[in-house]
Image (tube, grey):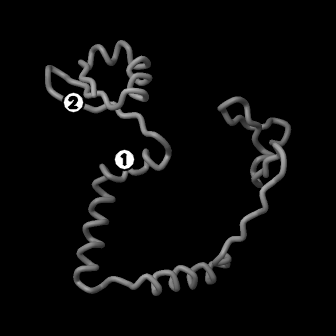
Amino acid sequence: MKIAPLADVKARLSAYLDECETEGPIVITRNGRAAAILLAPKDEEDLERLILAHSRRFQALLTKSRQSIRAGKGVSHNEFWKTVARRHKVKGIPSVRKRSPKLKGNRSKRSSHSKYFKRKTRRTVLNPKLV
């Protein structure tokens, strides 16, 4: 873990981001005191965990749920999944999705909205021919 002053990080943010990915978190200081941490998530799940771990709203929901379970107001595992299946049937959504077979070669399955979009390198752009 490295410690860096805010002024230096502002001047060379790109270099610090690269360093953060390879060497780990960087503590950013303002006037000699820790002000922030620069942290590169490993993947989407890691990012989601970080965001939820620091979300006051989500933590409050967890606390409320734990209190409810302790008070005996919880639902069993089987009851939960029966309720989920029942709600899906009401909405007309099949309770079990069938996986599509893997495609051979380099072909990829297109989603229903893909005809309206073209992929260009890493950006998605609206296809003017179809709009």
Q: Name the residue under label 1.
A: 50
Residue at the spot x=80%, y=42% of the render? 131
Residue plotted at (25% across, 25% down) = 28
The type of residue carrying mark 1 is: Leu
Q: Name the residue under label 2.
A: 35
Q: Is residue 8 above or below residue 53?
A: above
Q: What residue sits 42% from the left and 17% below the top?
A: 15
* Mark 2 or 1, nearer chain start: 2
Q: Which residue is drawn at 61% across and 83% down?
A: 90
As drawn, the residue found furthest toward the left would be 32
Q: Position of residue 112 (x, y in %)?
A: 77, 55
Q: Position of residue 104 (x, y in %)?
A: 84, 51
Question: In this image, 47 relative to 103: left or right?
Answer: left
Q: Is mark 1 on a helix, strand or loop?
A: helix
Q: Nearer the viewer, mark 2 or mark 1?
A: 1
Question: Which image quarter: residue 41?
Answer: top left
| Quarter of the view holding residue 40 | top left
Which part of the image, by quadrant, shows the N terminus? top left
In the image, is residue 85 above or below residue 30?
below
| Residue 60 in the image: above or below residue 121 | below
x and y, in percent, of residue 38 in the image: 33, 30
Within 10 angstroms of label 1, few (less than 14), some, or many (20 or more) residues? few
Q: What is the CA distance from the residue labelled 2 to the residue labelled 1?
A: 17 Å
Q: 7 left or right of 115?
A: left
